[in-house]
Image (spheres, rainbow, N blue to C red):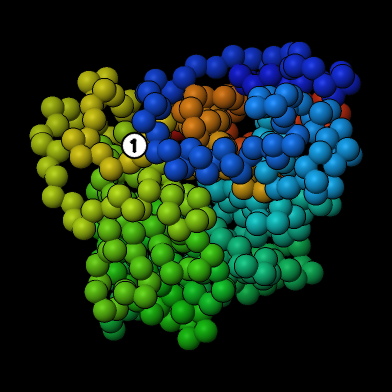
């Protein structure tokens, strides 16, 4: 069966509030010191998951952390905090210790590679996209029943990305094509065959400046108001599509290579982050797109291309996964106006799609690294592997988690940099994974075709047997 390793000691709620009594497993550090981690982000992370002082005092001037769940509940009932209820930080303090490491339990099994998989913002839906033209929308609240089974139209190579509209009524999907398709996922029809049982409207991103050209889209996101789409493409550009006007409204030649990832910085939708195979992360202010046509700032530090970016949601911090086998944490206040650093000649040649990362490059560091922290241990090879902050509502974004080429899911502590959990089940690359926004549940998807969920404490069912299948390799990856 699949299994997980975690350094967190899981306490028993049947005891009298004493210390943790059993350990799920062990851990190793990230291999890089974290003594100089930006004190502000460390403090913000701690504040989001630190209980009220009235719940953690054991004697005057002394606090006990972590506070056991039994003591937390007793303190709430005794109104030790003077509020009569838990704050969001109190809830995160309890839930952040219960990592979703038990299982896994099988959600679905397909015969083709899983490329994307994400919970909706409220956790009621889960979307998974596969190389074999299938996209499935699962209703989590109804026992993971398939709400919509979509057969994609005009697929080129694979589903590269999907995004749900803010009202969760529509889903867009992209492939290696300039045309993105949109589907109504709230309709009554379960089987959605493109332009047979349902219309999959095509949104052509190539018709900008009166010139049409072909390219593929790696990343696409709805704006927070649902009126626009932003996309990153393999023609080195960022595109903005106006859904009300039904046309692309802007193309920015943003990078010197493929734009693998784009995302919004916060709910305002003004700032956009982008990451590229030119090794750079860039920050774009939408209010200045047309006037300036250049980024608000550039962040250097990765030695190889960026595969994914996830925002902390505060318009200040974000993380990026890189082909240099690292995740980096960034503070945009450190960004530079330009990127003038020359990394010099590399004495090695490699291609991340089918080669291991060169041993001589593993200890190399960027001479002008602007990142706040670096997390190591996972493997970013073969495809554009994704990484994320853990949910704010249940963990206070205390963790960073990522898929990996070695078929595991890694969970790191943001502040210490230590690996706190390792989820093992899959027989091939884990390209994407998603943590439920409210509950200690994580779903991983792999090129072995399995979609599995990890929980704490579990659902009482027998976990899924280990899957040792490996899909036939291919010479082209994305």
Q: Position of residue 26 (x, y in %)?
A: 59, 14
Q: Is residue 467 above or below residue 337?
A: above
Disc 1 packing (10 Å; few <14; some 14–19; many ≥20): many
Q: In this image, 308 relative to 44: left or right?
A: left
Question: Which quadrant, please, contains the C terminus?
Answer: top left
> Can residue 175 be spotted in the picture?
no
Q: In this image, 4 relative to 405: left or right?
A: right
* Circle 1 residue: 323
Question: Which quadrant, please, contains the N terminus?
Answer: top right
Tell which residue pokes out farthest to the bottom in this image. Answer: 245
Q: In this image, 206 relative to 241: left or right?
A: left
Q: Position of residue 429 (x, y in %)?
A: 50, 32
Tell which residue pokes out farthest to the front in this image. Answer: 60
Kindly state the secondary structure of the residue where label 1 is placed. Answer: loop
Q: Is residue 368 above or below residue 176?
A: above
Closer to the camera in the image, 109 or 266: 266
Residue at the (25%, 72%) spot, across then down: 293
Q: Quadrant of residue 449?
A: top right
Residue at the (77%, 67%) spot, across then down: 189
Q: Is residue 34 above or below residue 330?
A: above
Residue at the (61%, 43%) spot, across then down: 48
Q: Position of residue 299 (x, y in %)?
A: 28, 49
Closer to the camera in the image, 221 or 127: 221
> Can residue 247 be spotted in the picture?
yes
Q: In this image, 6 relative to 372: left or right?
A: right
Q: Position of residue 365 (x, y in %)?
A: 24, 30
Q: Quadrant of residue 364?
A: top left
């Amino acid at each position: 069966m699949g299994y997980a390793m975690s350094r967190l000691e899981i306490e028993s709620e049947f005891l009298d509030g004493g210390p943790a009594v059993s350990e799920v497993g062990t851990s190793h550090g990230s291999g890089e010191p974290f003594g100089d981690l930006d004190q502000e982000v460390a403090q913000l992370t701690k504040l989001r998951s630190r209980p009220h002082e009235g719940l953690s005092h054991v004697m005057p001037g002394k606090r006990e952390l972590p506070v056991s769940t039994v003591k937390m509940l007793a303190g709430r009932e005794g109104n030790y905090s003077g509020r009569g209820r838990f704050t969001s930080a109190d809830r995160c303090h309890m839930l952040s210790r219960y990592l979703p490491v038990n299982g896994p339990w099988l959600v679905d099994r397909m015969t083709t590679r899983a490329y994307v998989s994400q919970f909706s913002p409220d956790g009621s839906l889960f979307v998974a996209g596969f190389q074999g033209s299938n996209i499935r929308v699962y209703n989590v609240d109804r026992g993971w029943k398939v709400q919509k089974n979509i057969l994609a139209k005009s697929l080129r190579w694979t589903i590269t990305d999907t995004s749900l509209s803010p009202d969760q009524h529509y889903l867009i999907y992209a492939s290696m094509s300039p045309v993105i398709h949109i589907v109504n996922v709230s309709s009554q029809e379960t089987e959605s065959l493109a332009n047979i049982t349902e219309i999959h409207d095509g949104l052509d991103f190539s018709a900008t400046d009166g010139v049409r050209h072909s390219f593929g889209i790696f990343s696409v996101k709805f704006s927070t108001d649902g009126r626009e789409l932003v996309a990153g493409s393999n023609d080195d550009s960022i595109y903005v599509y106006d859904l009300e006007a039904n046309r692309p409204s802007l193309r920015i030649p943003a990078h010197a290579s493929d734009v693998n990832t784009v995302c919004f910085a916060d709910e305002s939708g003004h700032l956009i982050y982008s990451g590229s195979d030119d090794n750079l992360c860039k920050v774009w202010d939408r209010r200045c797109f047309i006037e300036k046509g250049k980024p608000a700032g550039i962040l250097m530090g990765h030695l190889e291309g960026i595969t994914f970016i996830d925002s902390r949601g505060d318009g200040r911090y974000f993380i990026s996964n890189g082909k240099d086998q690292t995740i980096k944490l960034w503070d945009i206040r450190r960004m530079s106006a330009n990127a003038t650093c020359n990394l010099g000649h590399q004495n090695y040649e490699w291609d991340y799609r089918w080669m291991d990362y060169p041993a001589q490059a593993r200890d190399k560091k960027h001479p002008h690294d602007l990142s706040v922290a670096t997390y190591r241990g996972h493997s970013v090879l073969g495809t554009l592997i994704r990484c994320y902050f853990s949910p704010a509502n249940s963990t206070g974004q205390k963790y960073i988690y990522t898929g990996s080429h070695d078929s595991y899911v890694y969970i790191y502590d943001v502040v210490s940099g230590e690996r706190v959990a390792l989820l093992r089940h899959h027989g091939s690359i884990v390209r994407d994974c998603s943590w439920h926004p409210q509950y200690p549940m994580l779903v991983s998807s792999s090129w072995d075709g399995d979609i599995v969920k990890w929980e704490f404490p579990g659902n009482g069912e027998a976990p899924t047997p280990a899957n040792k299948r490996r899909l036939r390799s291919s010479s082209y990856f994305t």
